[in-house]
Amino acid sequence: MTATVTTPAARRVFSVFSRKAVVPWLFLAPGLLLALVFKFWPMAKGIWLSFFHVRPFLGDQWVGFENYSRVLTDHRFQDAIGHTLILGIGQSAGAILLGFVLALLLEGQARSLKIIRTAVFLPAVTATAVVGELWRLMYYPTSDGLLNSGLHLFGLGPVQFLDNPNIALYSTMAMSIWIWAPYNMVIMLAGLAGVDRTLYEAAAMDGVSLWQRLRYVTLPAIRPALMIVLTLATIRGLRVFTEVYVLTGGGPAGSTDVWMTRAYTLGFTRNDIGGASAASVVLLCVTLLLTVTVNYLRKRGEAR
Amino acid sequence: MGDRRRRRRLAAAATVAGLMFGTVACGSGSDSAGSGDPNTLEVWTRSNPDSAATYDRVFAAFTKKTGIKIDYQPVINFDQQLQSRASTKDLPDVMINDTALMGSYQSQGLLKPVDPASIAGNDQITAKSWSSTVGIDGKHYGIPYSRQAQTLMIRKDWLKKLGLKAPTTWQQMLSVARAFATEDPDGDGKADTYGMVVPGSSQSGYAAWWGASFLWQGGAKIIESDGKGKYSPAMDSTAAVNTVTWMKDNLFCGKKGVVQPGALTAVTSTATNFQDGNAGMYMTGPYNITTFDGTLGKDKYEVIPAPAGPAGSDVLADGENVYFGAKTGKTKQEQALGAFLVSAEGQRIAMTSVDGHQPVVRIPVNSTLDAAKVRGDARWSVVQKAYEDSSEQFPNAPDFAPIKQDTADSLNSIFTYCGGDVRSQLKELNDTLAGDLKDQDLLK
């Protein structure tokens, strides 16, 4: 009988692992395990490597912050910051705006709208490598190219969309907007579906203009959706890689080189894994900072 | 309330700790197998399934002859895989990969030195080929296996139609290119043909790879050895300035159509204009002969030596070496495989195509063999002659990857901005190259 008597301390230990506390974590365990192995461990390893001169066979050499200072003082990385910002802001703003317009146009229950919505959403689910190849063909710099043959009709061109260093970044931006606008559209469509119809009716009774209806009814109502879209776009904009890599590879003359393509070149064509890790960690910190800021602003906005 | 939260946190921490333990346990459990048997060599090549089929025949013949078994692994993303094997300190016994990687591998300590005298039949490899495997410390770090040199592929039907002769100098090449671009060689009445194909992107260093032959022909070098293991950058020389200026003025900033549209962002996989039949010349490696025979047709084009520049007609040479992994402890067996791979028998098997599979030796390093005779294709003698008489590799001792990449970045930039000043841009490149060499402690 004495064996079944539990001391208060033992009961506390037992209650720490009471079923109520443990069960949720057990359910989360498979997901957590995957995240740990495939996300957090590599991430920690990346941060660790950024302080080393990486030599897998001879053993890594501790170099402290040398990788960081080298990356941050490299003029090509400094140029890449500018390109990343222009591309990130441009593609985010463009994709959000276009996504919003598409969402407004394609909101509704009609069967035809469903078909069009599916068609419009296709770019978001197509592999970026395929999209890149498609746009390379569209941008083909002679009058045989799709876009240039269009311009040719008006007696313009041919425009060197990808080979002109002043245009290449904007050509990349156009492709990115094309890819991401439908994605934003879907999130905003969900937001639009939640708008109280009576508000529109009341607005109509008050005789508001289209613009006023958008400004004072629609936009405030889909603000949560907009915030999600904005956060996602910020993160995506900063770590843009595939779009640039498949379309221009950072060229010509580095005019489309963004932070991630630089990091990739450093790591995989120059075998400088330490430097590439440092560059990625810098990007991680900036992204984290921006996400937290956007969140903070959102919360403050909600509180008001 | 607080107590409950604390309890939850504790439970969470316990779960995570449990997971960590589980992962670590799994990690230490996996061990690479197959390295135990002394009579089995693990061999890696950078090959797709097509060329792997040819290697299979080579290794089967070796096993039959010596009884040493081969655990053959064709690897496509060779360097990433090699890095992960390197971190386990257990390398493949023998690797066959690009000549240009030797300096990089050696600086990472991945290679075992090779004494040429220990390889049976080493005298059948020319001194020129052997010299291309000398590392920074004067020891050999590889056995030459396959070589190739760039040649000019040119549309002979176009030449004939326009009544032109195959070019032998830069100037002639330029006028042929202009004629191809403007005189409608394909006869469709449209201005849709171009002079030559240029993979001019800086991605993976292509601009430097393609441009190297021009630099050699103009008498320029990228870096120069002082013969005592130190190097100095040489891209600010008069020869380099003149060569790069000529390329910029005539190929990229001169008449339209001399090079294919989109050349500045093209890599070899996207620069398909020659095989698509809308560009007339392509300076490239002989591995393309198989491709072009299939897509364009053998009767449409010919393989000719590169047109000469002011300093001659040297072209870029490269190829593959056999490397021995460091600390593998199977030296005797590795030497036997090395000797077989470079023997006339081994090279002959690797040069012939069975069932349409890609051969893996282009120009044999074994001097008793003749590429054109083994293949029964006279065009290969052009390539072999180019390799033997007028070719130059990238310097093999230093880690050349950063040097190639920086050169490509700079050339691509010079060719892009037609208004720029070549001399000052090359001066800037030279400073960057000096930095690269300094990083490797090789700067003179």
Image: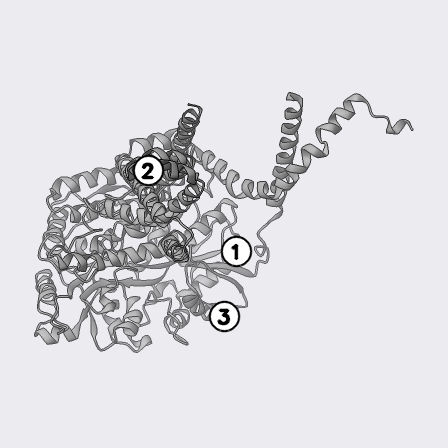
Q: Nearer the viewer, residue A111 or A78?
A: A111
Determine if residue A100 is in view: yes
Question: Which chain is mark 2 on?
Answer: A
Residue placed under numbered mark 2 in the picture? A214
User: Where residue A10 sits in the image (x, y, percent)?
Assistant: 78, 25
- What secondary structure is found at the residue carrying circle 3? helix
Q: Residue at x 58, y 57 (%)?
A: B34
Give the alpha-carbon distance from disc 2 to disc 1, as whole Å: 76 Å
Q: Is residue B23 depicted above or below B96 in this figure? A: above
The answer to whether dots 2 and 1 both sit on one chain is no
- What secondary structure is found at the residue carrying circle 2? helix
Q: Which amino acid is tagged 1?
A: Lys
Count neighbours of disc 3 (C-alpha within 10 A) and say few if under 14, some if 14 to 19, many if 20 or more.
some
The answer to whether dots 3 and 2 both sit on one chain is no
Count neighbours of disc 2 (C-alpha within 10 A) and say few if under 14, some if 14 to 19, many if 20 or more.
some
User: Where residue A256 sits in the image (x, y, percent)?
Assistant: 26, 44
Residue placed under numbered mark 1 in the picture? B330
Instruction: Work out which quarter of the rendered image holds the N terminus of chain B and state it.
Output: top right
User: Where residue B267 sits in the image (x, y, percent)?
Assistant: 27, 56
Residue placed under numbered mark 3 in the picture? B60
Q: Nearer the viewer, residue B18 or A169?
A: A169
The answer to whether dots 1 and 3 both sit on one chain is yes
Is B46 displayed left or right of B292 in the figure? right
Q: Which mark is residue A182?
A: none
